[in-house]
């Protein structure tokens, strides 16, 4: 069992989740149960799956949950693009959030490769 709080990828995923919650709070009311909710769920799924994987037995399980987290990061990446195209976020916000999502996917891929090599 690993302490997820010690993982840099978890910390960055948590920071992105906090940013998504902050930005979606500014969305129009009609988006509360639509895109804003989807973005929050996808974002929070990333650190949640990392944490769950850390609580499981072995590197193979952690790698599997990192794969799920990476899928959620891809989903969020699209939702950020959609929010930009719907003019719910500014282009600068899009660039920042999108680059964070891409960085997380890269970090998760590297972690998975390391875990799979060790098992």
Image (spheres, helix red, strand yellow):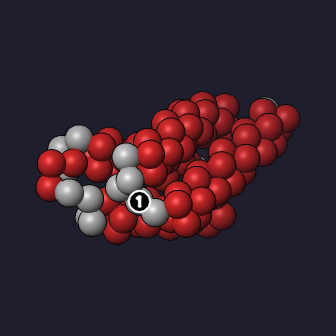
Q: Which residue is mark 1?
A: 89
x, y percentage for residue 51? 49, 51
Image position of 76 (left or right of 103): left
**Residue 52 visible to an observer of this rendering:** no
Seen as rendered, the residue at the extreme right is 117
What residue is shown at x 55% (from left), y 66% (from top)?
Answer: 92
Above or below — where is 90 with respect to 74? below
Which element type, helix, strand or loop, lies under badge 1? loop
What residue is shown at x 73% (from left), y 41% (from top)?
Answer: 109
The C terminus: image quadrant: top right
Image position of 76 (left or right of 101): left
What residue is shown at x 29% (from left), y 50% (from top)?
Answer: 36
Closer to us: 46 or 75:
75
- The image quadrant of residue 4 is bottom right
For label 1, the crowd category at 10 Å Cα-Cα, with few meaning under 14, some 14 to 19 and many 20 or more, is some
Closer to us: 101 or 88:
88
x, y percentage for residue 98? 58, 53
- The image quadrant of residue 97 is bottom right
x, y percentage for residue 29? 14, 55
Seen as rendered, the residue at the extreme left is 29
**Residue 75 visible to an observer of this rendering:** yes
What residue is shown at x 85% (from left), y 35% (from top)?
Answer: 117
Image position of 69 (left or right of 108): left
The total of numbered circles placed on residues is: 1
x, y percentage for residue 85? 44, 45
């Amino acid at each position: 069992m690993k302490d997820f709080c010690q993982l840099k990828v978890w910390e960055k995923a948590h920071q992105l989740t906090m940013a998504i919650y902050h930005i979606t709070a500014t969305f129009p009311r009609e988006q509360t149960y639509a895109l804003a909710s989807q973005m929050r769920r996808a974002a929070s799924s990333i650190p949640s799956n990392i944490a769950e994987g850390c609580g499981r037995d072995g590197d193979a399980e952690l790698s599997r949950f990192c794969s799920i987290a990476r899928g959620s990061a891809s989903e969020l990446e699209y939702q950020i693009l959609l929010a930009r195209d719907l003019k719910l976020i500014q282009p600068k916000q899009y660039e920042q959030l999108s680059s964070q999502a891409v960085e997380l996917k890269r970090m998760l891929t590297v972690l998975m490769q390391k875990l799979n090599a060790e098992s």
